[in-house]
Amino acid sequence: MSSNNSGDNPTLSEEVDDSSSSIQERLRAGARQVLVAFFLLVLAAALWELAKVITGSNDRTMPHIWDTLSFLGSTTSQNENYSWFLFKNAWSTAKASLIGLLVGTAFGLVTGTSIARSRFVGNGLMPLIVAAQAVPIVAIAPALVLWLGTGGVTKTVITTYLTFFPITVATARGIQSVPKESHELLRTYGASKRTSLRILELPFASPLIFVGLETAAAFSVVGAIVAELPFGSKEGLGVVILTSWQFYITEPRALYCVALTSCALGAVFVLSVRLMAYFALGPRSQGEVL
Amino acid sequence: MSGESQNFGLRATQLGKRFSSKGGDVQALENVDLEVKQGGFMSIIGPSGCGKSTLLRAFSDLVEPSTGEISVNGKLPSEARAAREFGVVFQSPNLLPWRTVLRNVTLPLQVMGVDRQSRNQTAQEMLDLVGLESFSRHHPWQLSGGMQQRVAIARALSTNPSVLLMDEPFGALDEITRDRLNLELMRIWGNLSATILFITHSITEAVFLSSQIAVMSSRPGRITELIDVNIPYPRNTETRDLPEFYELVIEVRRALLEASALTT
């Protein structure tokens, strides 16, 4: 808490730590962050080109950045702009990711709360959940497709499976770290378990839950793409990746383009969560979106 | 309970509390008899670990007594808690950092289900009372330690309790701030006429505030002496300069020494 104990008169304004900065300052800080992010992107591109020179890779294995980017303007065999084609597929993947993320978050909040509330549930459930996370999803994805088909259900199951874990852990840890005194405070008011969950435990845990949600958001995109890889899906970034593999020998740039698109989609998801955290947590967020 | 006990804001009869742990049982309280009249101000002073806090936690229904009887306004602590007859102020301000000062004060009322408009109004009145009316929109981390503790007092008062249980509320503050908050507490108490049980480590604080001081010894925790403070209220800055004040400080210190001699 505040280390300022010099006095206690509320009229002394220097007692008050007024660190809510102006909008102008925040915008300037935001602009700086964007600049740094852009600089890092340029740096990554430069490293790619440098690696290409050092290893002496040909344009098949490592196409130039500008060649890859120019491929975004090309036309597909269906006479479609390639960027538009990628966008349509990314949109399909994004929908699947979002559904999985929402279901996984709901699941994770419930499991995390139960684990925190009951040692019995926690001790029994936690090892199982951790063990389940060690199963490589790619290994069982074909089996899931056989059971559940190639439709949205499989995608949702896989993304839910990947996203609920970080949320569960974050929720459980967050609620478990509520100070004993805060629990006692609510107890003296005669608060029910539900009231204390709503007023104390979830708000207290929310900064941690948002960290879990960030991880889960990235996982949800990976999960949806993995779910689209095995046979039979008709659209989505996973399908595009699969076809790009097949044509890599003749056209490597397609694969790099779809890889970049996947990155971009993941970034959009994670940044959206950060933005939500920024508004939901107010002064408790780190105040930085990027 | 009998009609007679209605006159007591707080009462403990032959109260005992034993904690069981792996290292053996600890007798935290033994044969504690304590009576605080309604509207009285009782301080409990004693060495660390003498069971002062356990006593207060028994009154606030956070600890179940092992033996004896205990009552708040003639009721069981659990009944008194359900009727919101007491408020508790802990050693740490214990504010929720994501809530503004105002919304921290409305917390107990929100749990009770009071509607937003009237709970905000009550909370604002309580902030007026503790002199923080212009800080309702601030967050706890923007306030000094002393101001945070005043918010905690406002919060405890928001349900209009007739009993206030205070567990070393100013223990973490520097002496200057503590003296100022003692004056403040006297002013607030004068407006309320509540029964107060006040746990403290500070002899001068106990003498300045209380109408009666209970001195405790440790292991087992018991009350060794009751000292009446016959300095008339309202008390103010000059109270600390009175010869009676000094005499009482000396008396309490002697009683504390005797209490600790019992255990060593």
Image (spheres, coloured by chain):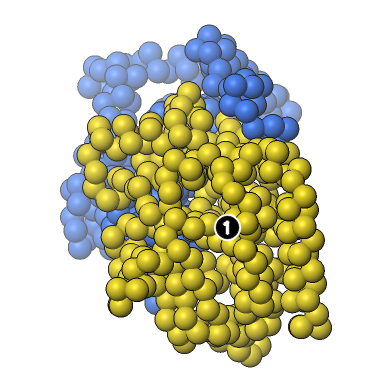
Chain colours: A blue, B yellow
As drawn, the residue found furthest toward the bottom would be: B24
Please name whichever residue, B197 or A33, is drawn nearer the observer in this view of the structure. B197
Please name whichever residue, A109 or B129, is drawn nearer the observer in this view of the structure. B129
Residue under the image location 51 percent in, 30 percent down? B131
Dot 1 crowding, Cα within 10 Å, few <14, some 14–19, many 20+:
many
Question: Looking at the rendering, in which quadrant would you find the N terminus of chain A?
Answer: top right
Amino acid type assigned to the residue bearing label 1 in the image: Ser
Position in image of residue B259 (x %, y %): 74, 76
Quadrant hosting residue B84: bottom left
Position in image of residue B256 (x %, y %): 75, 70
Residue under the image location 76 percent in, 83 percent down? B263
Please name whichever residue, B34 or A194, is drawn nearer the observer in this view of the structure. B34
Residue under the image location 41 percent in, 40 percent down? B105
Q: Which chain contains the residue that carries disc 1? A: B
* Number of numbered tags placed on the structure image: 1
- Residue B240 drawn above or below residue B260: above
Residue at label 1? B211
Whether residue B229 is visible: yes
Question: Does residue A94 appear left or right of residue B233 in this picture?
Answer: left
Quadrant hosting residue B73: bottom left
Question: Does residue B167 appear left or right of residue A254 in this picture?
Answer: right
Position in image of residue A74 (x %, y %): 36, 15
As drawn, the residue found furthest toward the top would be: A24
Whether residue B95 is visible: no
Quadrant hosting residue A86: top left
